[in-house]
Amino acid sequence: MTDIPAIDPMTTPAWEALDARADAFDPDLRAWFAADPKRAATWTRDAADLHVDLSKNLIDEDVLAELLALAEQTGVLDLRDRMFAGEHINVTEDRAVLHTALRRPAEDSLEVDGQDAIADVHAVLAKVYDFADRVRSGEWTGITGKPVETIVNVGIGGSDLGPVMAYEALKPFVREGLECRFISNIDPTDAGETTKGLDPETTLVIVASKTFTTLETITNAKVVREWFLGALRERGLATDEAGEKEAIAKHFVAVSTALDKVAEFGIDPNNAFGFWSWVGGRYSVDSAVGTSLALAIGPDGFEDFLAGFRAMDEHFATAAPSDNVPLLMGLLNVWYSNFLGADTHAVLPYSQYLHRFPAYLQQLTMESNGKSVRRDGAPVTYDTGEVFWGEPGTNGQHAFYQLIHQGTRMVPADFIAFANPAWPFKEGEKDMHELFLSNFLAQTKALAFGKTSEEVRAEGTPEHIVSARVFTGNRPTTSIMAPSLTPRVLGELIALYEHITFVQGAVWGIDSFDQWGVELGKVLALQILPAIEGDADALAGQDQSTKALIEYYRANRD
Ligand code: F6P
């Protein structure tokens, strides 16, 4: 096992200095901008195609210097280099962390556990692309010779959130006539609603599961298989065992690291796309887990997607610390959560296409950094992962922005927008996208600069409601812009947040790549099921609250 030091960040001189600064900190964005006409330029960075304005954050040069010192003293960049090199930085699972290898060019090589990881990656990519070409061209057909029209991805967590988010984000790039649907929840509603109205003869099912043991996915996959074979039988198709086998071979493929389990399930291993233990589920959208996306946007689109990740990896690996956007954004998050008391972080895309991006980031950030012990097993004595959340603007503006503007809690927020719309609608003479962007800009402006009581009074506001209409300002935001939302830019955005998450975990000294916290619930669900089904002994073994809830269920189930 590699020795990966876990420094207690609170013991570093930089932490102490930041603590002292936070105590005396009195941010005033209005005054800072007024005093420094170059503040916007000074605090704006470009990373690949992303234009990132950090100027409306509660930061000055002194805080930046201490944050960079904190990164230095906690070994963030050393850990980054170890990650890129394939060292086992996931210490509790004794694994390399190599999602960055998924997007390295074919001419590179990287030996991991005695294997060339890059060669393996490109062999699988070639297989995925060949399959995608055959499906998209209509060469691959179902058992009745019809081409695929609908792809159903069955997966959960990292085997669902990335594919669905990226498919939704890249809809303008999806080949006409192809549709992807996604089933994740073990609530039977999900499988029922998703298969409703589907033609089994033109449906391709992708069962995506890294482990191929996840209860939700395997249950859903079996349910979908039954729906599929039943629907075919109603049409007089696949009526015997050989027919069923042929139908499954033509309509079911799998993505997994456990190819033996794929075969056990009945899917032809030739129709399975592998990946590796060194790709965490939440870091896997650019592996074979993205097969549904590769089918939808095609191999060229997927290559652009990978190129975006690669561009951000190169930036993270090589940019100087003071220009390194993932490093700076990760350190800002540490500043807000450990020194200025922020508990949550909002991500607010001004792009309807990115409507699943916040949900995707919830798994990425919270499964990674929701930890209470460091890599050496010692309990942390400081806060770790903050709660990530969000919704697209402008919808959020009419829902929860009130709290961000005038509530008692600080909610640092990332605003994301694109210069070019996918839909060039106009409302009369007005460009609809410009109306949209004016909201993006207005919100960050209002959050930063607020509105003083003098300004409110000057509008003739009655004195008794002046205070209710004051905006304090000094509410931190980062604005991220790019020319357009393309596969490449989406890859850059995802990689940006992967590396921000990495930086925070590295400062905190935690293992951002395990997820033991989701295990207990899985084990208990299996123990509780017999009690729900009526096993008296299993019911008697439950705690009183669980027992009473099961009794309520059994009394009310029709
Ligand atoms: O919820 C825990 C988890 O292990 C995630 O990390 C993972 O993305 C998800 O379950 C699905 O796992 P699998 O791809 O193995 O089915």
Image: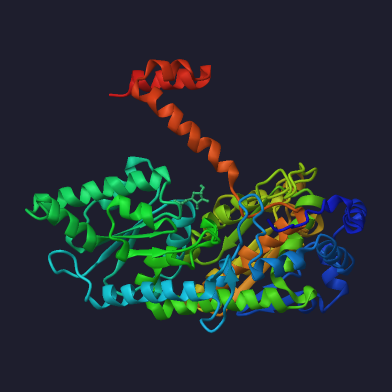
Q: Is residue 149 above or below residue 424?
A: above
- Quadrant placement of the C terminus: top left
| Image position, residue 540 (x, y; %) | 46, 15
Return the residue nearer the eye: 20 or 509. 509
Return the residue nearer the eye: 115 or 253. 115
Q: Is residue 450 left or right of residue 143?
A: right
Q: Is residue 79 above or below residue 299?
A: above
| Image position, residue 487 (x, y; %) | 48, 75
| Image position, residue 321 (x, y; %) | 78, 73
- Residue at 51% across / 56% down in the picture? 281
Q: Is residue 382 above or below residue 94?
A: above
Q: Is residue 556 visible?
A: yes
- Quadrant placement of the N terminus: bottom right
| Image position, residue 483 (x, y; %) | 56, 80
Return the residue nearer the eye: 351 or 537. 537
Q: Is residue 222 above or below residue 493?
A: above
Q: Quadrant of residue 330?
A: bottom right
